[in-house]
Amino acid sequence: MTIILAAYSYHHKTKDLALKDVLDVGFQKWLEELERGASGMSNSTGNMMREMVLKGPSSYDALFVYESVAIDYLKNAEGRWGALRVVYPNTTPGTRTRITS
């Protein structure tokens, strides 16, 4: 789902994403650069969110997780890292959640 949302954002679209958009050479190159910059990957969004809550928001530049996971873990983070909140960017369709402090 994250790759599809990234493709929507890359192509500045809010609907009608096509297979050709995902297979686009420019998008693929951009996605490879994004992947090279990623570290601390985990086998689940729950584990990544747990690590962020334990280590603080400065442990990740970005975290793509399911909305329900973010909301559940926000309860555990209350008072630890300041006022955290869920942000819903309006640049792409679907549920994309970002935690900010």
Image: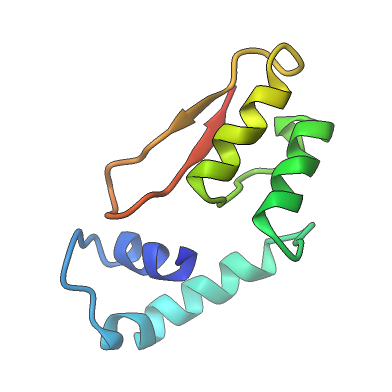
- Name the residue at the right extreme: 55
x, y percent for residue 78: 68, 16
Left or right relative to 1: residue 49: right
Q: Residue at point 76% right, 61% down?
A: 42
Residue nearest the viewer, comparing 81 with 37: 81
Position of residue 101 relative to residue 58, above or below, is above
Q: Check the picture and name the quadrant holding the N terminus.
A: bottom left
Q: Residue at point 65% right, 23% down?
A: 75
Position of residue 80 relative to residue 59, above or below, is above
Residue nearest the viewer, comparing 39 with 95: 95
Position of residue 43 relative to residue 88, above or below, is below
Q: Residue at point 79% right, 57% down?
A: 40
- Specify the quadrant of the image occupied by residue 11: bottom left
- Specify the quadrant of the image occupied by residue 60: top right
Residue nearest the viewer, comparing 85 with 75: 75
Q: Residue at point 39% right, 79% down?
A: 26
Left or right relative to 51: residue 11: left
Left or right relative to 6: residue 92: left
x, y percent for residue 90: 27, 42
How many marks do you count on the picture? 0
Q: Check the picture and name the quadrant holding the C terminus.
A: top right
x, y percent for residue 83: 60, 14
Position of residue 101 relative to residue 44, above or below, is above
x, y percent for residue 64: 56, 52
